[in-house]
Amino acid sequence: MVDRTERAAAFTLLMAAILLGGCVALPKARPDATAHEACAPTAQFAFICGAMKPEDLAHIPDTPWVVASGFATGAGLKIVDSRTRKGRLWFEGASGQIARDPQYPDCATPPDPVLFTARGLSLRVTAPGHARLLVVNHGGREAIEIFAIDYGNPQAQPRLRWQGCLAMPDGHVANSVASYSDGTVIATVLTRPGTSITDFVLGRATGGVYERAPSDKAFRLLPGTELPGNNGLETAKDDSGFYVIAFGLREVVAYARRDTHEPLWRAQAPEFMPDNIHWDGDRLLLAGMMRDEPACGGVRQIINGVADGMTCHRGYAVAQLNPMTRRFSLIAHGMADPVFNGVSAAVVIGNELWLGSYQADRIAIKRLPGMN
């Protein structure tokens, strides 16, 4: 058991190390390397360093602000100003950041900042200048954390307040999350109890999509949504259904909300493994690592009965999917980068592509040619 003094000290150190005055002190590439050198641009990317596994990204509409998750213990949420490329740890657990809402009753206390492990994000505008942020949390509990965002003052950093959480079923670890306009929340589970990553790499059904309406007391599995590695998730703009990524098949699978027993359609991504999926205008934006990477021995390997951990650096791709035509349009791709692997999310801000990663200690930024 860690006492309050130790926890406070740990959190202070975490905040100092996490980010983001441009670059932070990262593991040095060589004994005399400086933090600046460790965060230097590569041939493909500029970086915002210290982000600690920014597995998912969300852009607050009509603002310069980007939210980044942190898929590591205590990495929590970060808020980044895209104009200055600087930011900071956002949720600190202060009293002014807590405003409990009885419609999210499962947790009596907010996530512990020392443990907060944020994965998938989903941001929905609820009124002008206001949004709801859903965050998959693994730190201290398996739950969907709900935050209110007030960004009505264009001169100030948006305000964040924790409102409550929705607990995942026992033994179930959420991956991604999304919501409908009526407040119904859906979440993916990559591997249900008794299944493994190796199973979905082999094409076996391992995951599912789980739903919880405002009147429900718990999440329930939507029948027919069991896929090989249920990963990224997004709802249709008209609330008619949702799109989920079957990671083991590289497919986007569409379902109707009223009946999930059979998919509406499937579309396989061209030669890359999409991870997260979010709206970008009227198209869906997907990002992920290349399927066949020669430097890594080709496609993902099963070694001694276990899928490899994908730590070998792979190239990446980002594409838009038109859900009407079911056609992909590649907007960016590149070779393996020496300091940035595990591409898992993307947002477009002006003429820049921002990339998240479930492995790296930074956010990558790439200029998109031909964009104003």
Image (spheres, helix red, strand yellow):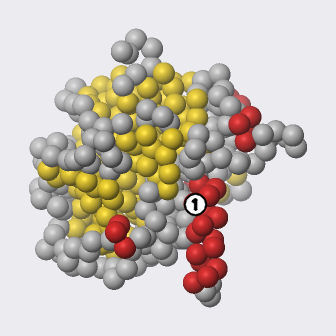
Residue that appears at 48% across and 34% down: 84
Compared to residue 50, the image places residue 11 above or below, namely: below
Helix, strand or loop for disc 1: helix
Whole-percent x, y for residue 250 in the image: 43, 40
Residue that appears at 16% across and 52% down: 126
Does any portion of residue 261 appear in the rendered image? Answer: yes
Whole-percent x, y for residue 233 in the image: 33, 49
Compared to residue 280, the image places residue 11 above or below, namely: below
Compared to residue 59, the image places residue 206 above or below, namely: below
Left or right relative to 123: residue 354: right
Compared to residue 297, the image places residue 131 above or below, namely: below
Instruction: Answer with the quarter of the image where residue 267 lies.
Output: top left
**Three-letter code for the amino acid on which mark 1 is drawn:** Met
Towards the viewer: 174 or 124: 124
Towards the viewer: 228 or 61: 61
Residue that appears at 65% across and 50% down: 308
Pointer 1 residue: 15
The crowd level at tag 1 (other Cα within 10 Å; few <14, some 14-19, many 20+) is some
Whole-percent x, y for residue 104 in the image: 24, 74
